[in-house]
Amino acid sequence: MGRMHADVAPYDALLLVSFGGPEGPDDVVPFLENVTRGRDIPRGRLEEVGQHYHLFGGRSPINDQNRALLAALRADLAEAGIDLPVYWGNRNWDPYLVDTIRQMAADGVRRAACLMTSAYSSYSSCRQYREDLAEAVAGVEGAPELDKLRHYFNHPGFVESMVDATLAALADLPDAERDGAHLAFVTHSIPTSMNDASGPDGGAYVAQHLSVAAEVVTRVLQETGRDHPFDLVFCSRSGAPRVPWLEPDINDHLQEQHDRGVPAVVMVPIGFVSDHMEVIYDLDTEAMLTAEKLGLAVRRAATAGTDLRFVRAIRDLLLERSAVERGEEVARNAAGSLPPSWDRCPVGCCPNPRGERPALCGA
């Protein structure tokens, strides 16, 4: 049974929960200290990583992208006749989650739905956000009750935006190279142990990405008549060399494709909802430099960003969860081989590798 009207009860707010990023050169190292707190990473290493940000004026694009998404969400909800305030809080930089939760409490918000700007299951992309929500709520008297909207990696609005982005990147290749192009679906690398523990049964992080990639390839085939070979590849590894992380790295993958005689590669950043640092540095800067050295034709597909289909998908997820909380039957939209994800994360889902911490939005 579908949702026939724009009723968002019992929610009286929507909270956008994101990672955060520095807004100027002086913010870079303090931001990285926030991100790595408790991991005993030397300041010199943080300053080295910070050089990536300084290539772009010491400013991450993620906050501006979240501001654009907030504006798009507010406009879409208003157009749909939904009068709902939309807040924004970050895990690692201003506006911090605790400050946003404090403002929501002061505004009288009693129950809010939360959208994470990470679409997949793993400790770093889901449970860590839930832990930070728990910590923020614990520090605010009268904090609202919070529910997390389900993972949206396979929502048609997200998938369709990635399909069209892939088609546009393919179309930008020279005719002689387009038909033989390889599709490299890129996401953030994580420790293999974290992937093995992701989701309620393990392996969810890779499985979810592979499902989206296969669906995009199928739809590209339907549109173009070409069945492009593809792989899931990774970027932004940050762990110690002795700890196994998901591979191959995008740069090694480009070298491999070149050695195999592949004429072109399209990088499809399905692991990211917008063009933040992992995209503009790891892909647009570092990987493109690798491709240039190899003489390999490479294009990068756009992220979902503020694509209207993605923005409307968020509204659909909000209405879906609202109806569920009211006890109504709903049709859950999903594309590809995997079913819609759970509303409340199961017990033991995506455990913290360093020990258990309180987390909201679980069973």
Image (spheres, helix red, strand yellow):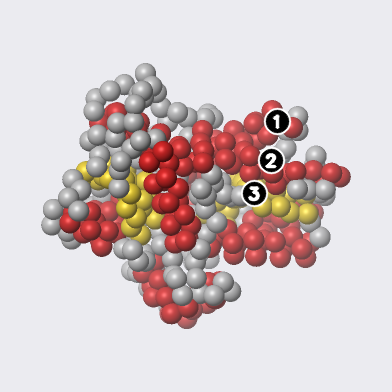
Rendered view: 44 above or below 152: below
Q: In terms of depth relative to the viewer, which is nearer, 224 or 195?
A: 224
Q: What is the CA distance from the residue labelled 3 to the residue labelled 1?
A: 16 Å
Q: Horizontal placement of 227 versus 16: left or right?
A: right
Rendered view: 217 above or below 75: above
Q: Position of residue 116 (x, y in %)?
A: 38, 48
Let me know if residue 99 appears in the view. Answer: yes
Q: Horizontal placement of 270 versus 115: left or right?
A: right
| Pointer 1 with pointer 2, Cβ within 8 A | yes
Residue occupied by mark 1: 223
Let me know if residue 191 appears in the view. Answer: no
Rendered view: 229 above or below 356: above
> Which comes sooner in the sequence, label 3 or label 1?
1
Residue neighbourhood size for the residue with mark 1, other residues' Cα within 10 Å, grouped as few (<14), some (14–19), many (≥20): few
Q: What is the CA distance from the residue labelled 1 to the residue labelled 2?
A: 8 Å
> Which comes sooner in the sequence, label 2 or label 3?
2
| Quarter of the image where the C terminus is located | top left
Which residue does the image show at 78% across and 48% down from the upper left? 173
The amino acid on which the numbered mark 3 sits, given as a three-letter code, is: Ala
Which quarter of the picture shows residue 124?
bottom left
Residue occupied by mark 2: 167
Q: Horizontal placement of 220 versus 340: left or right?
A: right
Which quarter of the picture shows residue 250?
bottom right
Q: Among all residues in the image, which is located at the extreme left?
A: 141
Residue occupied by mark 3: 301
**What secondary structure is marked by label 3?**
loop
